[in-house]
Amino acid sequence: MRRSFSLFLAGGLAAAPLAVPAQASAATATTVAAPTTAAVARLKPFSTFKISVKHSSRTKRGGKITYYVRAKNLGPFYADYYWIGGEVPKGVVPTLRWGAAKGTKCTWEDRWFWCWGPLRLEKGKTDWLNFQVTLKKGTKGTATARVGVMSFDVDQGMENIDEEELKRLGIKGYYWLKKVNTKIVSPPRRPGRSWSPPPPVKTYNPPTSHEESNKKKDT
């Protein structure tokens, strides 16, 4: 169910305007689908998430940017309809590499890269995703990404409802995204001057991990 539903979510988010959290250091939950009444708007999501991100702060033109995303479920309930990933920067080649817990699957459409695992995330537990993009050589300035979690409130007994019915029922979705910037620097061309690449970000590789590449799908 989550495999096919993820394509619907990615397409829905790509078409919907996304508000950036007020502060990059504090990810804010925002409703994807607008509630119909004030009472519904006051309802809290089934699960809220604390997002932490490490990433490459600098890279050269045509270089790589690596993101290390951690998402802790703060509850009050377990989460099973959630995705970890986010919006990749503009100006990247259409192939990226990622690593995550065993059994994780990912999809990349437009600028949205989302991954989902086979198990639910209990309250107090943390999920993780590492992924790396490669910049096109003509990309310059600042590479901006928004990474974190997207979660939907799906009640028990609704697991087999198809995508069109979920849309018709107006199932609420939330996201927690952090905006992160990477400065793209150009190595000096004048003789006698040297350029040192930035040090790599410390990695986090749990023993039960899986790595593979994803190509962006046509939209």
Image (spheres, rainbow, N blue to C red):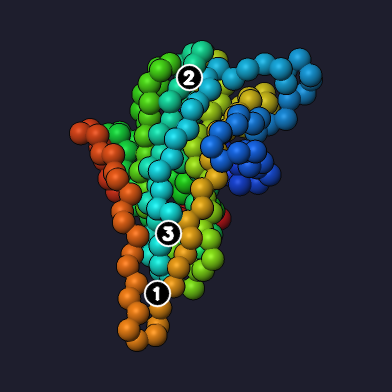
Tell me the kind of residue under disc 2. Answer: Leu
Q: Nearer the viewer, mark 1 or mark 2?
A: 1
* Residue placed under numbered mark 3 in the picture: 58
Residue at the location (45% across, 22% down)? Answer: 73
100 horizontally vs 73: left or right: left
Residue toward you, 8 or 116 = 116
Q: Is residue 98 above or below residue 150?
A: below
Q: Is residue 141 above or below residue 124?
A: below
Q: Nearer the viewer, mark 3 or mark 2?
A: 3
Labels 1 & 3 near each other (Cβ < 8 A): no
Residue at the location (61% across, 47% down)? Answer: 14
66 horizontally vs 150: left or right: left
Residue toward you, 112 or 66 = 66
Asked whether residue 57 appears in the rendered view, the answer is yes
- What is the residue that sits farthest to the right in this orientation? 37
Q: Which mark is residue 74?
A: 2
Q: Secondary structure at mark 3?
A: strand
Q: Percent from the top left, x then y, of residue 184?
A: 47, 64
Asked whether residue 154 appears in the rendered view, the answer is no
Q: Upstream in the sequence, badge 1 or badge 3? A: 3
Q: Percent from the top left, x then y, of residue 167?
A: 65, 30
Q: CA distance from mark 1 to mark 3?
A: 12 Å
Q: Percent from the top left, x then y, of residue 31?
A: 66, 30
Other residues around mark 1 within 10 Å, as few (<14) / some (14–19) / many (≥20): some
Q: Secondary structure at mark 2?
A: strand
* Residue placed under numbered mark 1 in the picture: 187
Tell me the kind of residue under disc 3. Answer: Arg
Residue at the location (31% across, 56% down)? Answer: 199
Q: Percent from the top left, x then y, of residue 158?
A: 54, 18
Q: Secondary structure at mark 1?
A: loop
Q: Is residue 156 above or below residue 183?
A: above
Q: CA distance from mark 3 to mark 2?
A: 32 Å
